[in-house]
């Protein structure tokens, strides 16, 4: 039984889909079984496989928003979020097309969101499909400027079974308060894919919103079910967004304090890219970040002008150690 006060929250679930015909049916079937009612939106991101036919034939109740081209994760989810907000959503959940959710996943995210009006984003325990290893329990952002998923690849031994506040939430299975989205803005489409969820979490923190982790909100992820198809795509966008994320969001004197560590991490990424045959995508990503300088300057000005928390608070939630090497993320 769901508490009547919680039932007042109108939720939409947004799933971006690009060539996910082998996974989308399992994903949508799990969302249909949620114990908390929600409208389901699939943003069809220019797929050329059989995704559309599967959705239309097996899930006619799903709102299908067809896009003529791949808008990336950021652009794709923004299409769905705008639709949800225009139709009165109080909160919008994002979910990967290569994931499945436990029946109470959404219910528990909503309950956590309603526990505290300062919470703008709630994420859950995102597991691997073997149900033994963790994919993410939220995101860290290190003083080296490198974000990474908390606890990735670790066995789940109950080490994250308590609710807590964290730095950031995975865009693959999290709930976003509509008021927070309206205040801070949607996902930055310049990111296209990778780290855009860390960017919106950073912006939320700077604006005074908190990010919560709710361990009872369980979902399971086919890791790299989509990105594994994309070759050097990952290194290009991860490089570009590494620069965008720091330049836009690291506030005040913290920007200068950690700039030497950020520079060191940039050199490490360059060396790693060279060793692994990914130097050209690294160069292209770096050049693209430089080309986006006008966008970065404008965004930084707006973000920092609206900051409502102290630099001491932001410093307290940063990860103070060198980030671990995680394949396809920062290695």
Image (cartoon, rainbow, N blue to C red):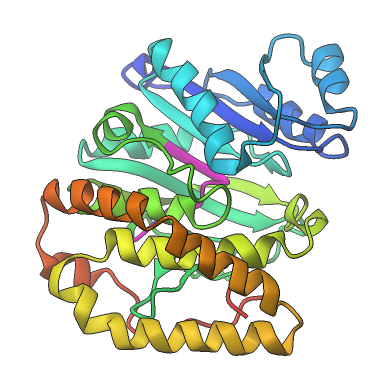
Q: How many marks?
A: 0
Question: Which residues are the magenta region?
Answer: 167-175
> Quick one: 54 or 165, which is closer to the camera?
54
Q: Residue at x 77, y 59 (%)?
A: 130
> Magenta includes 194?
no
Q: Left or right: where does residue 248 sit relative to residue 57?
A: left
Q: Is residue 160 visible?
A: no
182 up-or-down from 164: above or below = above
**Viewport quadrant of the C terminus:** bottom right
Residue 23 on image: x %, y %: 82, 39
Occupied quadrant, residue 53: top right
Residue 257 on image: x %, y %: 20, 83
Name the chief secondary structure element in magenta: loop
97 up-or-down from 83: above or below = below
Q: Residue at x 57, y 29 (%)?
A: 14
186 up-or-down from 167: above or below = above
> Quick one: 225 or 128, which is closer to the camera?
225
Q: Residue at x 36, y 43 (%)?
A: 121
Occupied quadrant, residue 42: top right
Residue 225 on image: x %, y %: 78, 52
> Quick one: 144 or 167, which is closer to the camera?
144
Residue 290 on image: x %, y %: 44, 64
Q: Left or right: where does residue 38 sit relative to residue 4?
A: right
Q: Residue at x 56, y 82 (%)?
A: 269
């Amino acid at each position: 039984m769901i508490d009547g006060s919680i039932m007042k929250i109108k939720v939409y679930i947004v799933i971006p889909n690009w060539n996910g015909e082998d996974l989308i049916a399992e994903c949508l079937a799990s969302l249909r079984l949620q114990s908390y009612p929600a409208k389901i939106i699939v943003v069809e991101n220019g797929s050329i496989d059989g995704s559309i036919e599967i959705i239309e034939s097996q899930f006619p109740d799903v709102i299908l928003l067809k896009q003529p081209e791949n808008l990336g994760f950021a652009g794709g989810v923004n299409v769905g979020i705008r639709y949800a907000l225009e139709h009165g959503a109080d909160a919008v959940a994002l979910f990967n097309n290569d994931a499945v959710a436990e029946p109470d996943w959404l219910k528990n995210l909503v309950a956590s969101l309603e526990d505290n009006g300062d919470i703008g984003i709630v994420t859950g325990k995102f597991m691997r499909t073997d149900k033994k290893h963790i994919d993410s329990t939220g995101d860290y952002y290190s003083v080296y400027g490198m974000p990474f998923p908390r606890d990735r690849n670790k066995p789940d031994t109950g080490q994250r079974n308590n609710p807590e506040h964290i730095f950031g939430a995975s865009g693959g299975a999290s709930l976003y308060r509509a008021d927070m989205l309206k205040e801070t803005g949607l996902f930055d489409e310049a990111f296209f894919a990778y780290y855009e969820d860390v960017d919106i979490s950073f912006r939320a923190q700077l604006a005074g919103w908190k990010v919560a982790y709710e361990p009872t909100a369980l979902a399971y992820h086919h890791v790299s079910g989509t990105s594994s198809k994309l070759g050097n795509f990952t290194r290009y966008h991860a490089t570009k967004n590494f620069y965008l994320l720091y330049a836009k969001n690291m506030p005040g004197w913290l920007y200068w304090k950690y700039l030497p560590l950020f520079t060191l991490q940039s050199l490490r990424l360059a060396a790693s890219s060279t060793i692994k045959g990914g130097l050209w995508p690294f160069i292209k990503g770096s050049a693209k970040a430089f080309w986006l300088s006008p966008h970065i300057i404008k965004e930084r000005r707006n973000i920092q002008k609206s900051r409502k928390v102290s630099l001491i608070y932001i410093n307290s939630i940063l990860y103070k150690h060198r980030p671990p090497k995680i394949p396809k993320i920062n290695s």
